[in-house]
Image (cartoon, rainbow, N blue to C red):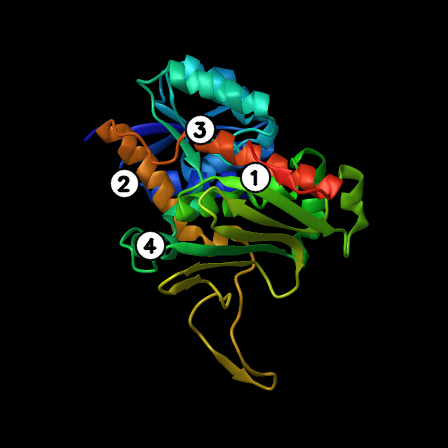
Amino acid sequence: MKKVRIGSVGLGRLGLLHAQNIASRIPGATLTALCDLDEARLEETAKNLGVQRTFTDFAQMSAWDGIDAVAIVSPSPMHTSHIRIAMEHGKHVFCEKPLGITLEQCKDAEHVVTAHPELIFFLGFMRRFDPSYAYAKAKLDAGEIGRVVLFRSYSQDPDSQIEGSIAYAPHSGGQFLDMAVHDIDLARWFIGSEPRQVWAIGGCYAYPQFAQYNDGDNVSCLMKFEDDAMAFLLAGRTAHHGYNVETEIIGTKSTLRIGSVPQKNFVEILDGYGVRKECSQSFHERFETAFLHEMREFVTCISEGRRPEVSVFDGTRVLEIANQCKTSFETGNLVSCK
């Protein structure tokens, strides 16, 4: 079978992870090109991964006939313009979350993707591809937990990464779009409904720098869905123990918990501090397998001509909900969802 030739743009932490996966861990793909504005990083990464072609201009890479698809891991405000450029050059697209940072951007992406039905578009909501989340979803779909009563999800970044979070804050779109986007997507995925009302609160409990962007270092939201299910989301930047993502789905028959005790692995350490477990320290460590599985699925969809489960419209809907959460956070009011 012919391998899918991929060009990847963006070599930050996640961009590098995707590039490494494509280069060596996706049997049906080959990393043919890299694109980044940092020429020194670009050349070093290309050398380390054995990539022959490099670009500092995304349009030039998209126009090159040596690739079949692109992986967009550029800064969030550039996602939709990169989607348009790539698809207008006939390239399949994998795009990291969020789809865009404004509704106008997301609608533009919808129009572009819809105009190119011959091309595969894949949005990187990677938690759907984590084995534990996929296992829980299968149980829910089989009716094992009954009707969903409450979906609860925490996403907490380690305090050790706060400098990067503050630096990214001006163009992150805020906590609800930057961090809680995954929790919002999971809530819709597990509940199978759309939010009817949201009420968001939070603040700058440790880092007042976020206040200038009408944001907080810890924010939360309570949601009421169309089918009367409830959801509670927390997004925080101040976890001292490490990277912490945990989810609970309470049903009328049983409850599912995923990652309720954050842990790096199954090792227990018995020492002078007592009995303890170490925690993952980053998102790419915790969701290493999920990132790998989603890229494999993208390549398989291209090879088989099959549409991914996650669509461009999911990206738009999650942004709309995140914006409604932000509006509630900023005003202190209960917001009705459209």
Q: For numbered disc 4, what is the local secondary structure?
A: helix
Q: Nearer the viewer, mark 4 or mark 1?
A: 4
Q: CA distance from mark 1 to mark 3?
A: 26 Å
228 or 256: nearer the eye? Answer: 228
Whether residues under marks 3 and 2 lie with C-beta atoms below 8 angstroms apart, the answer is: no
Local packing at callout 2 (Cα closer than 10 Å; few below 14, some 14-19, many 20+) is few
Question: Residue tagged by mark 3?
Answer: 313
Q: For numbered disc 1, what is the local secondary structure?
A: loop
Vertical side of 67 occupied by 27: above or below: below
Q: What residue is shown at x 56% (from left), y 47% (from top)?
A: 223
Q: CA distance from mark 3 to mark 2?
A: 29 Å
Question: Residue tagged by mark 1?
Answer: 12
Vertical side of 224 occupied by 143: above or below: below
> Upstream in the sequence, badge 3 or badge 2?
2
Question: Residue tagged by mark 2?
Answer: 27
Local packing at callout 3 (Cα closer than 10 Å; few below 14, some 14-19, many 20+) is some
